[in-house]
Image (cartoon, rainbow, N blue to C red):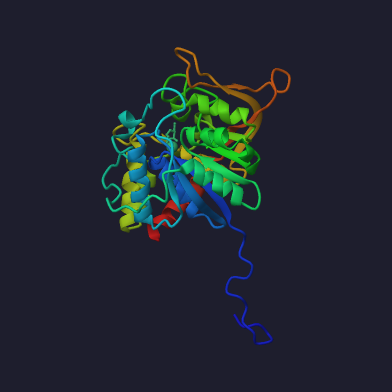
Amino acid sequence: MPRANGTLAAPFPNPPPMNPLWIDTDMGFDDLAAVLAVAGTPGWSVAGLSLVAGNAPLTVVVDNALRAAACFGWRFPIHAGAAGPLVGELATAQSVLGDDAMVSAGRSLPRERTALTSEDAVGALADWLRASPAPVTVLALGPLTNIALLLQRHPDLAPRIVELMWMGGSAGPGNHTAAAEFNAIVDPESINEVLAAGVPLAMVGLDTCRQVRVDKADADALRALGTDRGVLLGDLLEGYVRIAGPDGRSAMALYDPTAAAALLAPGSVRFTPAHLVAECRGEHTRGMTVVEWRVPRKAAANARIATTADAATVRAAVLGALAVAARS
Ligand code: RIB
Ligand code: CA
């Protein structure tokens, strides 16, 4: 666009600063949707992925991430991290999500894959935190094992995390058990490690995520875009929707992308300060995230807990970004 004096304006004068976001993930479909939402939202970029066992064993999580990277042309670094929780054996969600933790109503991620940047996710995250010019945000979408290991090995880096946005826990009923949400029950000790380190945790639990639903019509809309990626994302989304009911007629809560939307669409998820602790010993309650709302009278606030989600805004942010990924 020529100016009055005949010079040309810069093609993109003063583009908005990119918010680099590190994402820790156990790469199921909702994780994939959350990563695509970040990558497809103007002003945001994925600084790197750290992978953690959860939805499936680490080898499957790595395979999903590298196949997604090849399929969607991701250029950011991808690092393998913890293969199990701080304490005890790994419990996965493969009984619900299938062996590949990406149950589909049709197509699956193509088998072509990129390569891991490293198998030291904790070291890579530590390096990124040190190199960042200011404290940064981390989005966690699985068990908090990698984050806890980072804080155990590099306690000096806790102040470099301005906020840990975590899809996990619940201020109400669980999903993996009556009391516990899946990410929390896989590694409840890691939650308390993060809290003890003083990292500002923002927990987006099941109770909030259940306010945002996706259904088969959303999958059909992606497939109607008529691209290979649109059909793939539509089939994977329908596979995710079928978690709520095998006939696909029930709507399914949108988990990880709702936590991402809390960052991408400011104000779409509201939080309240509260006291949080993870139950680690209860025979029936291990993994329960116990929220004490009566702060500071009963306890000191040590976290921000999500209470409400604006479903229309979250859906628009996430499904809009998936449509961008489908068309690109
Ligand atoms: O309970 C839901 C969480 O468990 C999501 O992060 C999903 O990806 C699984 O990891
Ligand atoms: Ca996840």
In this view, the residue in front, 284 or 293, is 284
Left or right, 284 with respect to 138, comes to left
Where does residue 75 sit, x and y in percent of width and height?
43, 57
Residue that protrudes farthest toward the right in the picture: 297
Residue that protrudes farthest toward the top in the picture: 283
Residue that protrudes farthest toward the front in the picture: 153
Q: Quadrant of residue 261?
A: top right
- Could you tell me if residue 264 is visible in this image? no
Left or right, 122 with respect to 251, comes to right
Residue that protrudes farthest toward the bottom in the picture: 6
- Could you tell me if residue 69 is visible in this image? yes
The residue located at (33%, 37%) in the rendering is 101
Q: Quadrant of ligand 1?
A: top left
Where does residue 177 sit, x and y in percent of width and height?
42, 21
Where does residue 91 sit, x and y in percent of width and height?
37, 26
The residue located at (28%, 51%) in the rendering is 110
Label total for image: 0
**Which quarter of the rendered picture does the N terminus lie within?**
bottom right
**Which quarter of the rendered picture does the C terminus lie within?**
bottom left
The residue located at (45%, 43%) in the rendering is 120
Left or right, 163 with respect to 228, comes to right
Where does residue 56 sit, x and y in percent of width and height?
35, 34
Q: Quadrant of residue 158?
A: top right
Above-or-below relation of 92 to 4: above
In this view, the residue in front, 17 or 133, is 133
Above-or-below relation of 265 to 275: below
The residue located at (69%, 86%) in the rendering is 5
